[in-house]
Amino acid sequence: MHKLELRPGARPMVRGVASTASADGAGVKIQRVAGFQSPDFSPFLMLDEIRSENADDYIAGFPPHPHRGIETLTYMLNGEFEHRDHLGNRGAVSSGGAQWMRAGRGIVHSEMPAQAEDGRGGGMHGFQLWINMAAADKMSDPTWRDIQAAEMPELALDDRGSLVRLIAGRWQFDGAERSAPLTEAAADAAVADIRLAENAELELPLPADHTALVFVYRGALETERGTINRGNLLRYGDGEFLQLRAGDDGAGLLCLHGAPLGEPVVHYGPFVMNSREEIEQALRDYQAGTLTDR
């Protein structure tokens, strides 16, 4: 076990949460970290990882289903997903691309993986984040967009292959602000894919008032509490920057930061609101076919 010596100003690791095996949609196998009842994760609510070489684990996908009160951000490392919704939107992203959806007052959509021509799938590795919306915005108009891989800025961090891909929000690198293609996510949510070579280290400045989370999806991350292997989400405390150091085999990290909302969270299935009454209204609206009405 290796321990990182934190420099002054570095955010300490507060806690780690291991992802757990689950299933969603039409039986898609996932690893999930749920933070609906964890105010220190706000504005982030949940992170799902799909990772399988077996098409039977994911090919049934996520048939049409509703949402209200959240945004979702889907990011693919490998494989392809197609989105369709009641607004008539349709689009697909493959390896390196992302899809952002604001459910607002209501959206009904499907997310279906592409089937390889030989019928065997070809493997899939990707993530979906649920981002909470402020109470004042939960009944706003729904919207959606694709972000293709070629649109995402990719910055080299060293000469050993370490790099960062900017997916959402604003970041600081080498003293300059860098913007991802998606800057309109709720609560100024920001997402980056950071890949560090073996034992490489990165100092990553973040807004002092933002929540900071890191999901280790490959290799391991060295922290002041020891080595954290893949499949774990880390919550960091107060400070000026993240001090990230990869293990002996490098690390793949999904880094998140966003402004905490400080509002009640009531969650039921695909709906996230601020009170039980609002959840019950969402259920009535969906059953009546009026969830998506103005």
Image (cartoon, rainbow, N blue to C red):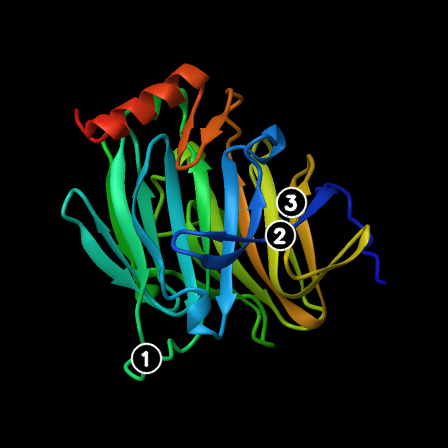
Depth order, front residue of 283/170: 283
Residue 120, quarter of the rendered image: bottom left
Q: Residue furthest left?
A: 88
Whether residue 176 appears in this view of the structure is: no
Residue visible at 51% across and 38% down?
Answer: 44
**Residue at numbered disc 3:** 241
What is the CA distance from the residue labelled 1 to the residue labelled 2?
A: 28 Å
The amino acid on which the numbered mark 2 sits, given as a three-letter code, is Thr
Residue that appears at 37% across and 60% down: 152
Q: Is the residue 267 above or below the residue 51 in the image?
A: above
Q: Which residue is mark 2?
A: 20
SS at circle 1: loop
Judge from the rendering whether residue 241 lies leftward or rightward of residue 70; answer left or right. right
Q: Amino acid at mark 3?
A: Phe
Q: CA distance from mark 1 to mark 3?
A: 46 Å
Question: If you read the primary sequence from the N terminus, does the residue marked by circle 1 or circle 2 appear first?
Answer: 2
Front residue of 220/34: it is 34
The x, y position of residue 58, in whole percent, is: 42, 64
Q: Quadrant of the C terminus?
A: top left
Residue in view at x 58 percent, y 36 percent: 41
Q: Is there CB contact under 8 Å for labels 1 and 2? A: no
